[in-house]
Image (cartoon, grey):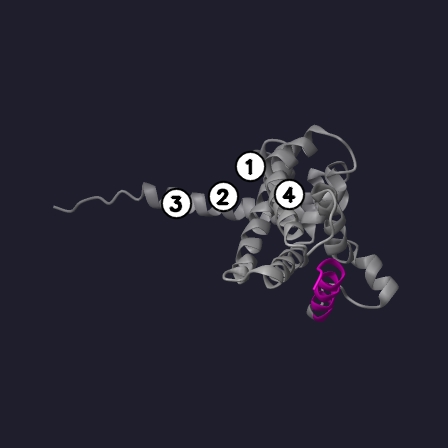
Amino acid sequence: MSMKTDTRPARMNERDVQREATQSRILDAAIPLFAQRGFAGASVSDVARACGSPVPLIMYHFKSKQGLWEAAVERLYGRVNAHLARELEQTAGLSGLAFYKAAIRAHISTLAAHPEHMRLLLQEGAEHTARLEWLIANHQKPMNDRIIALIGSAQGEGLIASGDPEHLMFVLSGAFSLPLVLAPEYQILTGKNPADSRQIEAHIDACLELILKA
């Protein structure tokens, strides 16, 4: 007697894979649009055109433009945090000046790999909104807290300028990221591509020389 094989789980898995692939395609299109244009400037129709999925399908998966934006932010921060964690592995076993040099290199390398991160913050940070409060509370504040602690530690070792670590965090964030965030302006002014690996290395070296006390 033959037994019937139930294929329903396999079909469900296929649907799950297809759903994840569709959502990934949508989010990969949404991230740069929200980063470049902000929440108000990037429409769901813009995302639909960029990813090739109709607006109703996007709304089916994310329910609203707000839901799409939040999912895009979560995806972006997941990538940024994972990349930074990999880069910070290079600090293992280091101490003193060598540790802080490696830590700064890790942060700038991560910004270079994901310039949408700071572009998104510049878009959202210009106006006090519920979106900004959500972004900071759920994603940016834990990152800021780690950077502030790192600055305080470097100050304690006399390796970085004194001053309010929270204020210095904004100063350093600008120094680390602006050539990458404002890449078109930088390229027009200098004739150099800030995303080029040699330019990234030169930028890292300049930041290290500017910030750390040898």
Which residue is the site of mark 4?
144
- In the image, is residue 203 part of the stretch drawn in magenta? yes
Q: Earlier in the sequence, mark 4 or mark 3?
A: 3
Using a 10 Å C-alpha cutoff, classify the residue at mark 3 as few (fewer than 14 neighbours), some (14 to 19) or many (20 or more).
Answer: few
The magenta span reads: 198-214
Res 51 visible: no
The mark lying in front, picked from 4 and 3, is 4
> Disc number at residue 138?
none
x and y percentages locating residue 179 in the rendered image? 78, 58
Q: Is 108 situated above or below 76?
A: below
Query: Label 1 is placed on what type of residue?
Result: His
User: Label 1's element?
Assistant: helix
Query: Label 2 is placed on what type of residue?
Result: Arg
Q: Residue at x 68, y 44 (%)?
A: 47
Q: Circles 4 and 3: CB distance less than 8 Å?
A: no
Query: Label 4 is placed on what type of residue?
Result: Asn
